[in-house]
């Protein structure tokens, strides 16, 4: 190949943007530059710095290239290379042995969103359903926020994100798009430049996005619901509420108004720590700007009261009537617009509701045998792990590690790098990357259906997820049409079964805008059974643990509160240069992030005798972490921020931050609560 060419691709990572990419192909097995597709109306030529350096991941010298079998104690790092076929034979033999001895529910295929492609990510479900292995409740990322949005709106969609360019006020709440979804900032910039729009950011600390805002509100972690209620109090009290809109489209506006009379700005100020007048000023700003756009993020999903908080905030555009204006309303996710029939991919026709379901966020309690986590089924004795790194990213990581180290647990990890989880496996299989396989992509933060095609040959013996799943299925005697198709054929069949053009047509077009014809502003009614937004939701329709959920929007006081023993509240948000635990292996990303660091208010540093660059021990009943200190005035006293999911080995004592986070499920459906941790601090 004498000259390089740019070929189409799609970013596969766990980000709402799912950017359309153009990748420089230098050789049949090598890429160069990566850029955003300028012709895509959402990506608009803009991608994050992480993905622009993607060649550093694809051609990384530490990438896994051959299957490995453990030959020493678990975690010892002692391996021998074996053939791929021999590795699959061992995995299948172990799965069959465990199923014979303990029943099929003792096998737990475990996965998440290391790739967001539907074939490569979700094919593991097909193996699970056909074999009757334990199910997985996918709670770790969005369960709490989903529950809150669905409680009121009834369907997972919202305004077209491109409408932000037509907004007069944009409120980023529960997200940091400068770090996690850079395209949002593109559309905010258009609105500010062309319309003089204002940007408000609600976040417990001064993020990169907050630094660019006209107003930053920094509530104490887990108090967003109180802030939202106080804003609605002002909207009703000062004439900003659109009573006509609510009469047409909401279920209980009079009851809500009565309820909110006691949820004053002074009440919220005491809970949130935000100045009372600042709350009033924000409420007036929001009420006066009918073209007000709420861009709601996944931060809501990181707190035990996250569902109630998301519901409370999602009430705002209904009270103000912003939904009735172009450039107004809200967007949490548009993932509900694609209508994919994934029967072939996931084997949904073989799903058995009687099979035990395990909460993925509670992998630690599951693996150490806690009965409330295991339910009525057996202990887990075999796992296949794809697309995730639970030893680093899951809550209560000490229990995760303890469980993975069990001698009676067989673990196969299919990975691109030797992650914290792979280090504890019995078999490690090398995996392909997005440019080395075919897949189908949708997006929550935009509206395009896309195909990513294989453009280069994978290095070494790397195999796609689909090939591994089909190889195991063959050995285990699992029969389903999805196992007999290539990844491309699965994409094609799924598209056609869903009423979309086939794979060839979509690939040639590169993407399909699926929001056309969608009722993005709920002009025909909301997605609830009665077509109304529910201020007073039926939480029993959302999740099983609904009994204590607030009847109307409120501050739901179930968070892990600060106490004399644990006087600080810690959150663990994403770092700009990482994406969960991905990109932590890229030297440029690590160099830009520096090292694991605790951001602590200068007043707290002074009180504890902490200095910039010194170390502090952060702890609670779950464990302790030793970490460097950075005084930071962009948060309230009593709040601690530790950004990024660094590898455990990057910390001073080799123990990562999730040793501190709790695995107890947030109501009503469960969910990991990474921003809801009470801790103590001790100087070292």
Image (cartoon, rainbow, N blue to C red):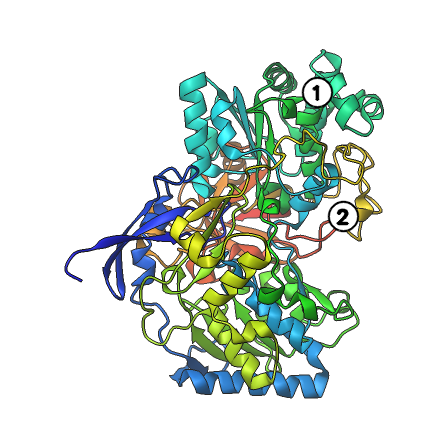
Quarter the N terminus occupies: bottom left
* Rendered view: 550 above or below 137: above
One can see residue 303 in this view: no
Query: SS of the residue at dot 1?
Result: helix
Question: Which residue sits at x=47%, y=38%?
Answer: 177
Asked which quadrant contains residue 84, the reply is bottom left
* N-terminal label among 1 and 2: 1
Residue 79 screen position, x and y as percent: 41, 82
Query: SS of the residue at dot 2?
Result: loop
Question: Which residue sits at x=54%, y=80%?
Answer: 472
One can see residue 329 in this view: yes
Nearest to viewer (mark 1 / mark 2): 2
Residue 380 screen position, x and y as percent: 67, 75
From this viewpoint, which residue is outermost toward the left? 2
**Residue nearer the viewer, 650 or 440:** 440
From this viewpoint, which residue is outermost toward the top? 238
Q: Which residue is mark 2?
A: 542
* Rendered view: 178 above or below 289: below
165 horizontally vs 5: left or right? right
Where residue 265 is drawn, which disc sits there?
1
Where residue 98 is drawn, which disc sits there?
none
Mark 2 crowd level (few <14, some 14–19, many ≥20, 10 Å Cα)? many
287 horizontally vs 46: left or right? right
Rounded to the nearest angstrom, the CA distance separating label 1 from label 2 is: 30 Å
Residue 11 screen position, x and y as percent: 42, 52
Mark 1 crowd level (few <14, some 14–19, many ≥20, 10 Å Cα)? many
* Rendered view: 66 above or below 212: below
* Rendered view: 498 above or below 489: above
């Amino acid at each position: 190949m004498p000259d390089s060419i740019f070929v189409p691709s799609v970013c596969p990572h766990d980000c709402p943007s799912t950017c359309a990419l153009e990748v420089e192909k230098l050789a049949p097995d090598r890429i160069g530059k990566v850029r955003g597709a300028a012709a895509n109306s959402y990506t608009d030529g803009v991608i994050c710095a992480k993905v622009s350096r993607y060649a550093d991941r694809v051609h990384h010298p530490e990438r896994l290239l051959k299957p490995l079998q453990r030959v020493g104690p678990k975690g010892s790092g002692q391996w021998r290379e074996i053939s791929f076929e021999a590795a699959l034979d061992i995995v299948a033999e172990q799965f069959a042995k465990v199923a014979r001895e303990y029943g099929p529910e003792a096998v737990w295929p475990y996965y998440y969103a290391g790739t967001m492609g539907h074939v490569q990510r979700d094919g593991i479900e097909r193996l699970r359903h056909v074999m009757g292995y334990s199910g997985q409740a996918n709670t770790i990322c969005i369960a709490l926020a989903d529950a809150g949005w669905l409680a009121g709106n009834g369907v997972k969609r919202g305004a077209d994100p491109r409408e932000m360019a037509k907004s007069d006020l944009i409120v980023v709440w529960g997200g940091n798009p400068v770090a996690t979804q850079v395209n949002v900032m593109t559309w905010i910039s258009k609105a500010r430049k062309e319309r003089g729009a204002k940007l408000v950011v609600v976040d417990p600390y001064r993020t990169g996005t907050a630094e660019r805002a006209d107003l930053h509100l920094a509530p104490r972690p887990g108090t967003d619901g109180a802030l939202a209620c106080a804003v609605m109090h002002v909207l009703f009290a000062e004439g900003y509420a659109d009573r006509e809109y609510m009469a047409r489209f909401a279920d209980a506006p009079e009851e809500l108004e009565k309820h909110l009379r006691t949820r004053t700005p002074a009440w919220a100020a005491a809970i949130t720590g935000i100045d009372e007048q600042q709350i009033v000023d924000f409420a007036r700003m929001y009420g006066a700007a009918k073209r007000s756009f709420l861009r709601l993020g996944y931060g809501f999903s990181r707190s035990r009261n996250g569902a109630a908080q998301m519901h409370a905030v999602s009430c705002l555009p209904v009270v103000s009537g912003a939904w009735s204006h172009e450039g107004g309303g809200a967007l949490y996710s548009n993932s509900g617009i694609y209508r994919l029939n994934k029967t072939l991919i996931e084997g949904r026709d073989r799903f058995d509701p009687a099979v035990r379901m395990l909460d993925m966020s509670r992998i630690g309690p599951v693996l150490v045998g806690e009965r409330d986590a295991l339910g009525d089924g057996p202990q887990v004795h075999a796992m296949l792990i794809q697309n995730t790194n639970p030893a680093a990213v899951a809550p209560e990581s000490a229990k995760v590690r303890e469980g993975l180290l069990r001698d009676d647990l067989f673990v196969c990890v299919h990975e691109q790098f030797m992650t914290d989880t792979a280090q504890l496996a019995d078999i490690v299989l090398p995996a392909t990357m997005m440019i080395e396989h075919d897949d189908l992509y949708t997006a929550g933060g935009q509206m395009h259906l896309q195909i990513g095609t294989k453009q280069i040959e994978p290095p070494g013996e790397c195999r796609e997820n689909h090939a591994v799943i089909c190889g195991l299925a063959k050995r285990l005697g699992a029969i389903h049409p999805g196992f007999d198709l290539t990844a491309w054929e699965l994409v094609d069949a799924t598209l056609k079964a869903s009423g979309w053009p086939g794979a060839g047509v979509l690939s040639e077009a590169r993407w399909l805008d699926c929001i056309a014809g969608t009722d993005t502003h709920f002009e025909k009614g909301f997605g609830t059974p009665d077509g109304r937004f529910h201020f007073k939701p039926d939480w029993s329709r959302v999740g099983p643990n609904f009994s204590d959920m607030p009847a109307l929007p409120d501050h739901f006081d179930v968070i892990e509160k600060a106490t004399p023993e644990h006087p600080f509240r810690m959150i663990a948000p994403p770092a700009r240069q990482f994406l969960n635990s991905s990109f932590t292996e890229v030297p440029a990303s690590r160099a830009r992030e520096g090292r694991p660091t605790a951001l602590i208010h200068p007043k707290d540093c002074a009180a504890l005798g902490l200095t910039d660059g010194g170390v502090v021990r952060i702890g609670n009943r779950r464990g302790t972490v030793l970490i460097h200190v950075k005084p930071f005035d962009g948060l309230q006293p009593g709040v601690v921020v530790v950004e990024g999911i660094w590898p455990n080995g990057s910390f001073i004592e080799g123990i990562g931050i999730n040793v501190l986070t709790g695995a107890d499920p947030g109501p009503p459906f469960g969910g990991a609560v990474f921003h809801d941790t009470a801790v103590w601090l001790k100087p070292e």
